[in-house]
Amino acid sequence: MRPITICRSLKPEVLADMRRLGTMQRLKSGQPVFHEGDPARRVFMLTLGSLKIYTLLGDGRRQVTGFMFPGDFLGISLEGEYAFTIEALQSAELWWFSRPAFDSFIEAHPSVERELYRMAAHELAAAQRQMVLLGRKTAAERLASFFLELLKSQEQLNGGRTERQFDLPMSRLDIADYLGLTKETVSRMLSELRSRGLIRLEQQNRIEVLDREQLEDVAGGNDEV
Amino acid sequence: MRPITICRSLKPEVLADMRRLGTMQRLKSGQPVFHEGDPARRVFMLTLGSLKIYTLLGDGRRQVTGFMFPGDFLGISLEGEYAFTIEALQSAELWWFSRPAFDSFIEAHPSVERELYRMAAHELAAAQRQMVLLGRKTAAERLASFFLELLKSQEQLNGGRTERQFDLPMSRLDIADYLGLTKETVSRMLSELRSRGLIRLEQQNRIEVLDREQLEDVAGGNDEV
DNA sequence: CGGTCGATTGAGTGAGCTCAACTTGAGTGG
DNA sequence: CCACTCAAGTTGAGCTCACTCAATCGACCG
């Protein structure tokens, strides 16, 4: 039994409060926050940069189960060991808390407990969508869904304003391991979406969405009518 | 935003308490508990039988995201709509609670809130394992993993006693839609595991594990040495 | 400029899918 | 009790989408 939790979007006043209680840590690109099997002793909040969360199979196959962006929260499990590895994609900055400190914080702010629960429910819904993606979507549908997910989280960070562009802080291999594909297939599907005029590469790692409606059709499997 | 939650393994005394507050409902095989998009008004606890949870894509592709067994808990989301459909696999019996009734119950038992959170964390860990399965495992590995998952949940229901057999209350198609395969592939892999002597079909829908160690090797990808 | 690493593109392969035939088993009625 | 029906499961044959392996491209950097 390895209970884990990833949480997002704590209220600003709560974040400020936790920042007072926590300790800051800087990470370089590629540096791990912790490894699979480490005891789950700390609670983290990401403030800068981005992280990837992944699990390895015995023979080296890798599944990226999520990415984390500023404001995201992780490591809130009540016991046991981490069931995954977390690594910085770029220079990153996070705040950590010992579990007793976090527990006493929860006690001081009882409303936060329900908030944490709400966030876990949100993560579960995201996990369920990812299962549909991994279990039933084609390569093109997966990449389109991923781009829309990134676009939406970008929009949420900017207070709900509609966006046309977003960054890809992760490599093609990371994307592949998140979508259950190979890096070659990711590259090919990216080229396909580009040649169909749905997206444009502003730079190697920055995407502009040219036709959002059709991208959403592809993502939802309502393509090739 | 469609927050959802599936929870398991509430403590017996809590279950008893909720049973006093709830209303019982019987379900026939194939009968839905609710549909995708229904407002999330109620909280359920399953007491008898088993259920499947699934999401449909526009063109009919289906992903089963989980199964529920007696003692399992579901529908604890604070707002929004159900993001999936739940259907009975057999005759089933469940207890439901209006959200206000459930909320006041939570208020009366504050310790339950943390318990609910712990269960959600447990579900998240399971969701993460399922992402590894769907993203990176072969057909044989998926089926072996599934059988071990069922065996373990069977053992947990029986108070931790080791078991050799378990039931498959779902059809081959349900299994396929859970594992991201087709029913034909499930059938073929089942025949393969059987011909390799790792399992035996006690009946059409009852499996006996003959070589658990090797089944675990297959499930974890440590096969074909 | 060469060197290196990530991304793209190409060619051929294969695991799992599709389509189809056949088998099994659970009901149902004569 | 057996014949019939119908749904579920199994097996076979061929195909396809994504994979593997390999070559090339391109950006960054000493």
Image: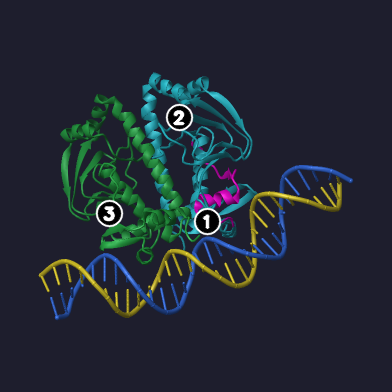
Chain colours: A green, B cyan, C blue, D yellow
Which one is nearer the viewer's eye here, A218 or A64? A218
Q: Earlier in the sequence, mark 1 or mark 2?
A: 2
| In the image, residue B172 lies in the stretch drawn in magenta | yes
Q: Measured along the vertical axis of the image, is residue A191 above or below residue A158?
A: below
Q: Identify the residue at image location x=44%, y=49%.
A: A131
Please say if the residues under marks 3 and 1 sit with CB atoms less than 8 Å apart.
no
Amino acid at dot 1: Leu
Chain of residue at mark 1: B
Q: What is the C-alpha distance between the residues marked 1 and 2?
A: 32 Å
Amino acid at dot 3: Phe
Q: Which mark is residue B49?
A: none
Q: Which residue is mark 2?
A: B10
Amino acid at dot 2: Leu
Which one is nearer the viewer's eye here, B48 or B152? B48
Which one is nearer the viewer's eye here, A99 or A5? A5
Q: Which mark is residue A166?
A: 3
Q: What is the C-alpha distance between the residues marked 3 and 1?
A: 33 Å
Residue A63 can be seen in this image: no
Could you say which quadrant of the image residue A101 lies in? top left
SS category of the residue bearing label 2:
loop
Bounds of the magenta segment: B160-183
Q: What is the C-alpha distance between the residues marked 2 and 3?
A: 42 Å
Q: Residues within 10 Å of mark 1 (few under 14, many from 20)?
A: many
Q: Which residue is mark 1?
A: B181
SS category of the residue bearing label 3:
strand
Q: Are marks 1 and 2 on the same chain?
A: yes
